[in-house]
Image (tube, coloured by chain):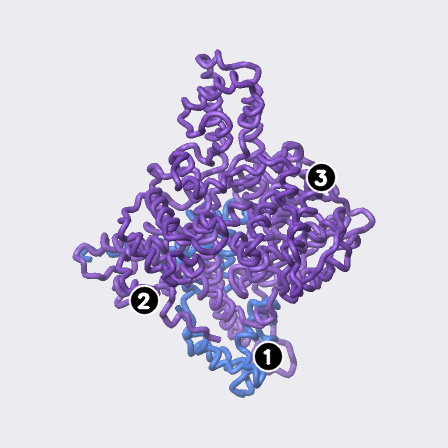
Chain colours: A blue, B purple
């Protein structure tokens, strides 16, 4: 890779292929379109951690003039490439995440009660739907003690990273 | 829409950014800090869920594309048989092997059928402890039948034949389209694909009640194949049909088709459960399937068909055709020309024979010509089919019907199209004009049936051939709008596609897909659902899942389990394409180091594989040992272990081919095993293998075949046990992926 230009092009083509593959997973009719409701999943699966509001902005950018309910790849690709190249919506460092949990655990118990977590997740920030909340609880709750040991939770999720 | 979709993207009103102060008095966390912390956690968690969703969707795609590739394979296999029929001489023993699947049922008159299916001579042994039936059936008979099946009993073949006989008699009286009304404030229950999943049918009955005059049902096809209790489901549905003919309605699905059944397990199930009379039962079912109604209309407003529609959908044509002539939707009905021919005088039949011979058909003169069958594509299926064409390039109902039409014109001596018929003038008579019309009407009707049974909806407008399945079309919301308006309908209910939630609306909620087989691909893969429809014609959906345990799994666990299963299936495919893959890899490894970059790996996979899968996304699941972004591909293949019954089976080429075509092979074996013993002789095996390899243009020496046959003859008795054969060549996965983790 003697030429810088070559390597930049090579990187770009890899990025394009990655985006294409992720897009294709949801392209059920093989016509380079996906349902707009899947865009969030696609973007996140590419390693980004946008908030719902940021997601909303991207969708507005890649939607058709008259929103048809689907997004075309030719509009999605350039926008997503920018996101990846500029490393927008980067990952959340484990220690920061832990801090966030610790903030919510003001009694410094080392764990959160399901009611506490539920209250925060469904009433603060960009609230979870009931189904999201149930799923998080089923993954996070220690079945014996009926509390959330957030330190373990965070490390367990991190291991899952592919 | 299913809530899970909201998780990945969450663009619903309730998820818009809300800034609220934390105003619960007893909490002392500053509002803004709590908010920021919550936001962070939510961002993180949603990303995690999205990644899971991506994995789940990939897994789904794997199953689905293998499933559809199998369906295409089935059609190609059919073409293989037709090719053989066309190209082998009548005297050839090979032809006899398989010609029986082409034998037309309508040759025998009804009275002969009644004699053939006579159940009266079948005796019930004293030690029989299954259910007894009396005819006409009573409600308690049928309830007992359901209970017996729940307790895993089997119905004696005498009763099976009797029940099927009665069913056939009834079905013949039914019109092509069931017309149902919701008067008397009756709610109708509509079920989708069951695919042999008895637990799901029993669960629906448990939740919703058995079919009765108060609880009418519509069943929308695909009762058989894949699951283990297809025959029990059929028997239950037919029993209820006989008991309440005005309140139970059955539609035909694309799996109610004996040719599809050869591949997808129903034939095997019946032959396994009914060793003595299985063949008769299957033959009777062939007729019954062809007599199943094609559609149901409720209150003249709601249309229910198994697959879907096309832009040329026409209820009038469907209503007036002779539906029973379409024994299998994979092959056109016996030409009316041939039907008429048997009534024509000798003189006229000679004229037509001359025309037929010109076309190079292999039909023999006189009565033997009746055995001539047209295949779905007009050209020889094996000639020059470019294997590098994508999977989606398979026969299309649109072009094949045109081709079929041309072929028939040619055979009738009518030339390529009416405008070219000047030199054929001398043959054109009133009879020929009638024939042309008849032939065109046939092609039209056939297309209606194929579209009805095989089509899928798409979100783009228009109507295009369904190349993924190889039959029917993809139709868009504009077509739904037009067809519904044209027929003054307001809703289309269909099945045919597995949906994670058991159902899915599309096309502005004008199309509803309903699927009733839960855990279809794997435990935990999806829910089943059914519809309750009252006089207001607003569909109410009820979901369920057959096994309790799967509901208690977290999303992560059930994704993991389904994924492992899909990956196993995928690895088998990888092994089957090993030599193609190796040569593709070697293109990127000119110095023969044995290593390629992962980037090149993905490109190579795409080139070789015709399974439209996102390889870069799947990569980490398929390739575990990489170094600095490079893969040692030879050792990668070693990871895919295969159990060899015989060490001398060094013919890896043969093994691989065996693997690639093993499901075709199984189908062929079952067809050849004419006495349904489960065994085929050496000679039959040899002939089959030779035929398949010549069709696929493979070079396999006779010696290799004999060696292979010997190695498969586990009992050393000169015959091959089909089941053992299939088991022996299943891929055994030796990697740690197989370990079940909680």
User: Pointer 2: what residue?
Assistant: B639
Residue hosting label 3: B173
Label 2 to label 1: alpha-carbon separation = 44 Å
Query: Considering only vertical position in the picture, is A51 above or below B483?
Result: below
Residue A114 tag number:
1
The image shows residue B309 at horizontal and vertical percentages of 59, 40
The residue lying at 49 percent from left, 75 percent from top is B742
Mark 3 surroundings: few (<14), some (14-19) or many (≥20) residues within 10 A: few
User: Residue B431 in the image: x percent, y percent?
Assistant: 56, 18
Which chain is mark 1 on? A
Label 3 and label 2: CA atoms lie apart by 58 Å
Indicate left or right for A33 with B453 as reference.
left
The N terminus of chain A sits in image quarter: bottom left
User: x%, y% of residue B280?
Assistant: 58, 48
Judging depth in this view, the residue of B394 and B7 nearest the camera is B394
**Can residue A24 be seen?**
no
| Whether labels 3 and 2 share one chain | yes
Q: Residue at x 42, y 53 (%)?
A: B680
Whether residue B525 can be seen here: yes
On screen, residue B12 above or below B298: below
Q: Nearer the viewer, mark 3 or mark 2?
A: 3
Secondary structure of the residue carrying numbered label 2: helix
Separation (CA) of disc 3 from disc 1: 62 Å
For marks 3 and 2, the one nearer the N-term is 3
For the residue carrying disc 2, how many other residues have a C-alpha within 10 Å: few (<14), some (14-19), or many (20+)?
some
What number is the disc on residue B426?
none
- Label 1 Cα neighbours within 10 Å, binned few <14 / some 14-19 / many ≥20: some
Q: Which quarter of the figure has residue B620?
A: bottom left
Q: Looking at the picture, tell me which residue is in the foreground, B144 or B469.
A: B144
């Amino acid at each position: 890779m003697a030429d810088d230009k070559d390597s930049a092009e090579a990187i770009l083509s890899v990025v394009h292929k990655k985006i294409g593959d992720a897009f294709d997973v949801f392209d059920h009719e093989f016509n380079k379109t996906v349902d707009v409701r899947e865009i969030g999943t696609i973007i996140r699966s590419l390693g980004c951690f946008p908030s719902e509001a940021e997601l909303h902005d991207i969708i507005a950018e890649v939607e058709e003039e008259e929103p048809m309910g689907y997004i075309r790849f030719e509009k999605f690709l350039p926008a997503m490439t920018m996101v990846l190249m500029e490393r927008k919506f980067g990952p959340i460092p484990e220690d920061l995440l832990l801090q966030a949990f610790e903030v919510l655990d003001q009694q410094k118990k080392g764990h959160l009660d399901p009611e506490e977590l539920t209250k925060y997740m469904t009433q603060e920030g960009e609230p979870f739907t009931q189904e999201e909340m149930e799923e998080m609880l089923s993954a996070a709750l220690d079945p014996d003690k009926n509390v959330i040991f957030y330190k373990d939770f965070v490390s367990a999720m991190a291991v899952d990273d592919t | 829409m299913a809530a899970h979709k909201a998780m990945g993207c969450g663009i619903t009103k309730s998820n818009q950014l809300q800034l609220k102060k934390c105003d619960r008095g007893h909490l002392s966390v500053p509002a803004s800090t709590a908010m920021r912390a919550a936001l962070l956690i939510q961002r993180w968690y949603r990303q995690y869920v999205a990644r899971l969703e991506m994995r789940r969707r990939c897994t789904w795609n794997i199953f689905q594309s293998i499933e559809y590739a199998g369906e295409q394979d089935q059609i190609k296999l059919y073409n293989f048989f037709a090719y053989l029929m066309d190209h082998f001489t009548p005297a050839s023993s090979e032809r006899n092997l398989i010609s029986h699947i082409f034998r037309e049922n309508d040759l025998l008159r009804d009275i002969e059928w009644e004699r053939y299916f006579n159940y009266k001579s079948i005796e019930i042994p004293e030690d029989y402890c299954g259910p007894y039936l009396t005819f006409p059936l009573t409600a308690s008979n049928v309830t007992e039948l359901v209970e017996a099946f729940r307790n895993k009993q089997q119905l004696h073949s005498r009763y099976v034949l009797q029940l099927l006989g009665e069913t056939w008699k009834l079905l013949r009286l039914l019109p092509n389209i069931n017309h149902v009304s919701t008067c008397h404030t009756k709610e109708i229950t509509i079920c989708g694909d069951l695919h042999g999943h008895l637990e799901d049918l029993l669960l629906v009955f448990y939740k919703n009640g058995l079919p009765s005059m108060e609880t009418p049902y519509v069943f929308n096809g695909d009762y058989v194949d894949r699951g283990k209790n297809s025959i029990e489901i059929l028997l239950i549905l037919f029993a209820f049909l006989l008991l309440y003919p005005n309140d139970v309605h059955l539609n035909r699905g694309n799996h109610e088709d004996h040719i599809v059944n050869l591949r997808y397990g129903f034939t095997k199930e019946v032959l396994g459960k009914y060793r003595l009379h299985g063949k008769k039962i299957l033959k009777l079912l062939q007729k019954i399937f062809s007599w199943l109604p094609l559609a149901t209309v409720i209150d003249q407003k709601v249309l229910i068909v198994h697959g879907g529609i096309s832009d040329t959908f026409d209820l009038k044509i469907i209503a007036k055709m002779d539906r029973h002539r379409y024994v299998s939707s994979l092959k056109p009905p016996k030409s009316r020309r041939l039907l008429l021919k048997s009534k024509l005088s000798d003189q006229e039949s000679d004229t037509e024979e001359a025309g037929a011979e010109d076309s190079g058909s292999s039909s023999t003169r006189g009565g033997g010509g009746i055995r001539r069958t047209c295949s779905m594509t007009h050209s020889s299926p094996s000639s020059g089919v470019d294997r590098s064409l994508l999977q989606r390039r398979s026969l299309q109902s649109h072009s094949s019907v045109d081709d079929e039409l041309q072929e028939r014109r040619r055979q009738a001596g009518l030339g390529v199209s009416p405008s070219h018929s000047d030199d054929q003038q001398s043959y054109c008579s009133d009879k020929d004009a009638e024939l042309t019309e008849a032939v065109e009407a046939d092609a039209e009707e056939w297309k209606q049936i194929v579209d009805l049974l095989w089509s899928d909806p798409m979100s783009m407008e228009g109507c295009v051939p369904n190349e993924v399945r190889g039959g029917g079309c993809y139709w868009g919301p504009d077509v739904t709008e037009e067809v519904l308006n044209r027929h003054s309908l307001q809703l289309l209910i269909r099945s045919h596609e597995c949906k994670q939630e058991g159902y899915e609306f599309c096309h502005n909620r004008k199309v509803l897909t309903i699927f009733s087989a839960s855990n279809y691909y794997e435990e935990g893969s999806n829910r089943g659902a059914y519809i309750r429809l009252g006089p207001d014609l607003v569909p109410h959906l009820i979901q369920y899942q057959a096994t309790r345990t799967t509901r208690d799994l977290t999303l992560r666990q059930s994704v993991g389990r389904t994924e492992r299963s899909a990956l196993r299936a995928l690895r088998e495919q990888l092994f089957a394409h090993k030599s193609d893959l190796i040569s593709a890899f070697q293109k990127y490894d000119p110095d023969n180091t044995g290593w390629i970059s992962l980037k090149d790996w993905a490109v190579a996979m795409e080139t070789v594989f015709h399974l439209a899968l996102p390889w870069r996304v799947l990569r980490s699941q398929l390739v575990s040992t990489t170094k600095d972004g490079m893969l040692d591909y030879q050792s990668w293949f070693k990871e895919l272990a295969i159990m060899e019954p015989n060490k001398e089976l060094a013919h890896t080429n043969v093994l691989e081919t065996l693997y690639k075509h093993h499901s075709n092979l199984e189908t062929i074996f079952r067809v050849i095993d004419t006495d349904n013993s489960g065994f085929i002789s050496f000679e039959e095996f040899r002939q089959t293998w030779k035929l398949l390899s010549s069709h696929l243009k493979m070079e396999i020496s006779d010696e290799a075949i004999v060696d292979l046959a010997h190695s498969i003859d586990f009992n050393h008795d000169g015959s091959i046990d089909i089941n053992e054969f299939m088991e022996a060549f299943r891929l055994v996965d030796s990697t740690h992926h197989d370990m079940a983790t909680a």
